[in-house]
Image: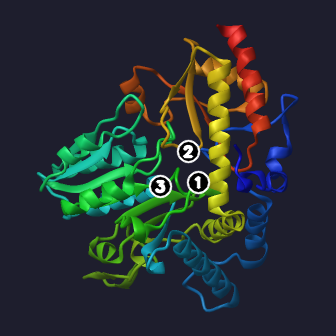
Amino acid sequence: MISESVAAFPIEKIGKDFPILQQEVYGKPLVYFDNAASTQKPQVVIDAISDYYQQINSNVHRGVHHLSQKATDAFEASRETIRKHINARESHEVLFTKGTTDSINLVANSLSQGMIKAGDEIIVSHLEHHSNIVPWQMLCERTGAKLRVIPINERGELIQEDFEKLLNAKTKLVAVNHISNALGVINPIKEMIAKAHASDAWVLIDGAQSIPHMKVDVQDLDADFYAFSGHKIFGPTGIGVLYGKEALLEQMPPYQGGGEMIAEVTFEKTTYATLPHKFEAGTPHIEGGIVLGTAIDYVNSIGLEAIAAYEQELLHYGTELLKDRFPDLRILGDTEHKTSVISFLLGDIHPYDIGVILDKLGVAVRTGHHCTQPIMQHFGISGTIRASFAFYNTKAEIDQMAEALEKAHNMLA
């Protein structure tokens, strides 16, 4: 039964807000189901990018002239918008980065400068994107720390008993995602953070997939670090956020040197700027930082609770439809604790072949390993077909995908 909030969801109005979705592909209406890779942009975000270059364009924090002041005010106002959105305690706990990958690398490189040493242990999970594995492997190579991995079960869920066994006095950091990009599985991160803190370990959460789908409260979670990307939440590419607790950020040495991150430079010694500028070397992605705030305002104008309810309805509808229609369909990550992703195989047909045919029929899905090769190795497969939804998608589009899948299945089975 559809709830009143889902029935009242303004999908027709929302769909018109995204001009790219009005086009046809190969003579078919575009169905965009690759939102876990990158989301489309509403007109208000597109206009904000144009407005920045027409009315504000100038460097920030460095000029006394009018445009520089306007740019600085807009940039810092966006930082405050983000602070409120994730409920950080202070705006200087919000660092602008290039994206989730850059945020994780910032933490890994900074901690490797004396804060993590030989013999320390870092825990990641089998569900991680490569960007939350490789930086920690590199840190371990530099420092002599050891990498430990939380295993998953056949539903794609982290095995919590094994996580608890991995925690010990040597554990320095736990790095896990909030939601798996490959499977859509939601991890119980609040409980995991509490367990890690009981072992005096820091916790970094990769929030790239959670930030567009649910309310995130970093103080309630008690996360030490939380990272996400602008292009996953209907904003520009090349901009992202690292939230970090003030006390921990103060301890950490800067990751990069250059302009903006300094207090004073002499050839004998350099002193560093205060937060957040200590970690924002060089001219930032000013337009991206400002417009990320616009994108978040747009999402909040719809409401994350309404978005979550609507997307769960899409997920349930799509899952049941595909299961009923294709007896040889196998869903990876088939668990009740998930959101907005159906990752599947259709018989023994290669995912790439399915993806090519769907594209010709106007349906954009992602195929392959989704930068999560350890997950694919666990299941003994090379990749999956991934349909990932956003709040501008519809049940009619899911029907269109099912029709396209049936044609592909008939051609290739």
Is 190 positioned to the left or the right of 22 in the image? left
Residue 170 locus on image (x, y percent):
13, 54
Q: Which of the marked residues, 2 or 3, is nearer the chain's N terminus?
A: 3
In this figure, which residue is indicated by the disc labeled 2? 339
Element under label 1? loop
Is 225 positioned to the left or the right of 267 in the image? right
Element under label 3? loop
Q: Residues within 10 Å of mark 2 (few under 14, many from 20)?
A: many
Which residue is found at the position 40% from the left and 20% from the top? 380
Of the pair 101 and 262, the residue shown nearer to us: 101
Q: Which of the marked residues, 3 or 1, is nearer the chain's N terminus?
A: 3
Check the image and report above or below for 134 versus 323.
below
Q: Which mark is residue 207?
A: 3
Which residue is found at the position 24% from the left and 42% from the top? 161
Quarter where residue 44 is shown: bottom right
Residue 354 locus on image (x, y percent):
65, 20
- Disc 2 vs disc 3: Cβ atoms closer than 8 Å? no
Of the pair 73 and 284, the residue shown nearer to us: 73
- Disc 2 vs disc 1: Cβ atoms closer than 8 Å? yes
| Three-letter code for the amino acid on which mark 2 is drawn | Thr
In this figure, which residue is indicated by the disc labeled 1? 213
Q: Which of the marked residues, 2 or 1, is nearer the chain's N terminus?
A: 1
Q: CA distance from mark 2 to mark 1?
A: 8 Å
Q: CA distance from mark 2 to mark 3?
A: 13 Å
Of the pair 287 and 343, the residue shown nearer to us: 343
Residue 12 can be seen, yes or no: yes
| Three-letter code for the amino acid on which mark 3 is drawn | Gly
